[in-house]
Image (spheres, rainbow, N blue to C red):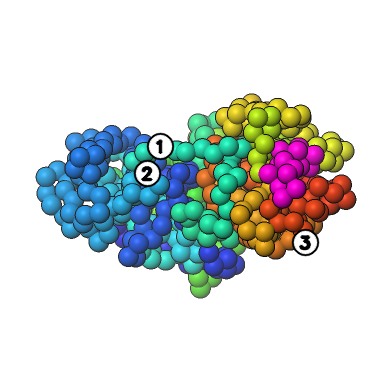
Amino acid sequence: MLLLSFLLLPVIGLAAAQPIQLFMNGKQLVPEVAPRIVNDNTIVPIRIIAESLGSKVSWDPKLRKVSVAKEGTSIQLFIDKKQATVDGKSYILETAPTIIEGNTMLPIRFVSENLGVEVTWDEPTRSVFLYQKQKESPEPDQTGSEDGKVKPGNDAAAAGNHSAGNNNSAGGKNPQESKDKTGDKEASSDGSGNPVKAGEQPVNPGANAPSPGCAVPQSATRSLAPGAADANAPAVKDGKAPVKVQSITFDGEMLCIQTTGGEVKPTMFKLAEPDRIVLDIPGAELDATLATVVNEAQEGTVPLTEPHDIVAKIRYSLFSKEPSTVRIVIDLQKKSELILSDVLPGGLISAKFAKGKDRYRVVIDPGHGGKDSGAVSVTNRFEKDLVLSLGHKVADLLQKEPGIEAVMTRTDDTFIELADRVAKAEESEADLFISIHANTINKESVGGTETFYWTPQSLDFANLMHKSIVEATGFTDRKVKQERFYVIRNTTMPSVLLEIGFLSNPAEEALMYQDAFQNRVAESIVAAIKKQLNLD
């Protein structure tokens, strides 16, 4: 089992129930079926991991066997059986593979170890972080785990999924099915807010000069007498000296990180609740000037010259010793984007917070339309008409906001394919996507408002939206739920599907077709959009 050394950093507690998230080399993966824990082992869909690793996956329906092959390694596993083989050698698994919603779920630890993938489990964020080393020039761990109290926990490991296909229901949902169930998923709570878009940053060498706003510290330019030994020089390990992080400064505009140079390849990702940006420098250690001023938790802080509207605090630590990784965590006052510059040959890394967009694009998707009436109310009125009316009210309010452009997937009683709704959002390069619906069930007493999301990056938005619309409707709170509806599963921006109320409930139906009610709900939807975009 791979052993990693972790820094325990304080963190604000997350909500109790949170979906398990997957990260590969710092980039978030979004599987069709949420990972889950079975017998203290995390199982995940095989396909998303295998494809990320460049593995070949095959399925033998007769033997119910999954084969994973990569670079001469052949792994064979059997559904509902704990026997497995790797290159012909037999193993007994702690948890048997299984099929959920047509997707083969495998124990992540077993597959990852045999494909050369390092794995860590982060309990506070319920996240699995995977890191694949390169053979020629291995990159140290560039995956992230919560900068809170990190526990290896159930080091579950990597695998993926074998899909048997997807069933898409009309209007992005099945109007005949009650949303009492949340589907195969972990219960939602916080999430990854704005997506959690994690990813590697470009690190091509730039000009051989400090970035504007970054001053090279004396420690980085000190000179030695001829023949003298540098007591602070990094120790050579495996024929390669680790990079030393010599200074970290922030002047209110530019974050400057001075290193001793070498192969510096920083990676960056975001975490939510609270909002943070995490910058990892693999293959690096802390210089004595930084290492000697850390606290008992082995964490240092970067002084802020004055209160900042975006940055609350900047922390650093030696996050991992094997492989050596320096981590810098920026605690945010509000969501923001950090732009990482090229690494200069002298080892200077600089980053600057991006200015907010002048204008955001929001797609409003009134469900159903045309030949697809959606749900039929207790007085024989159609869902498609209700959601179109509400969608227009939302769009009209958004158009009054100078920083928002509203785009509707349909403006009249027209049938629009689900794929075309998604395409419109993607082609519009939308920042947010909101699909509006009303619910139904064959029981008049059932009622309430619920909000659906699929991708982890949409969870923050779903929570914001749900809180706002529940207050506006006054209906029973049926919570935020994760469900794989087509339009929120296939859009790449934060996306939610709203079920305003039940058309099968006489009291709710009567209210939902009233202008005053629709205006109030439309205002609540717009308020949540503005809050998500930091425009409130």
Q: Nearer the viewer, residue 506 or 520?
A: 506
Whichever of labels 2 and 1 marks the residue nearer the N terminus, that label is 2
Residue at the far front: name it: 379
Q: Please say if the residues under marks 2 and 1 sit with CB atoms less than 8 Å apart.
A: yes
Q: Name the residue under label 2.
A: 102
Query: How far apart are labels 3 and 1 at the CA level?
Result: 38 Å
Q: Position of residue 357 (x, y in %)?
A: 74, 37
Whichever of labels 2 and 3 marks the residue nearer the N terminus, that label is 2
Q: Mark 1 points at which residue?
A: 165
Question: Label 1 sits on what residue type?
Answer: Gly
Question: Label 3 sits on what residue type?
Answer: Gly
Q: Position of residue 247 (x, y in %)?
A: 56, 53
Q: Name the residue under label 3.
A: 474
> At 56% across and 49% down in the image, what residue appears?
177
Label 3: state its secondary structure: loop
Label 2: state its secondary structure: loop
Query: How far apart are labels 2 and 3 at the CA level?
Result: 38 Å
Label 1: state its secondary structure: loop
Q: Position of residue 73 (x, y in %)?
A: 20, 40
> At 23% across and 44% down in the image, what residue appears?
64
Left or right, residue 243 beside residue 496:
left
Q: Which residues, given as a range, are shown in magenta?
A: 376-390
Whichever of labels 3 and 1 marks the residue nearer the N terminus, that label is 1
Q: Which of 211 and 87 is in front in this view?
A: 87
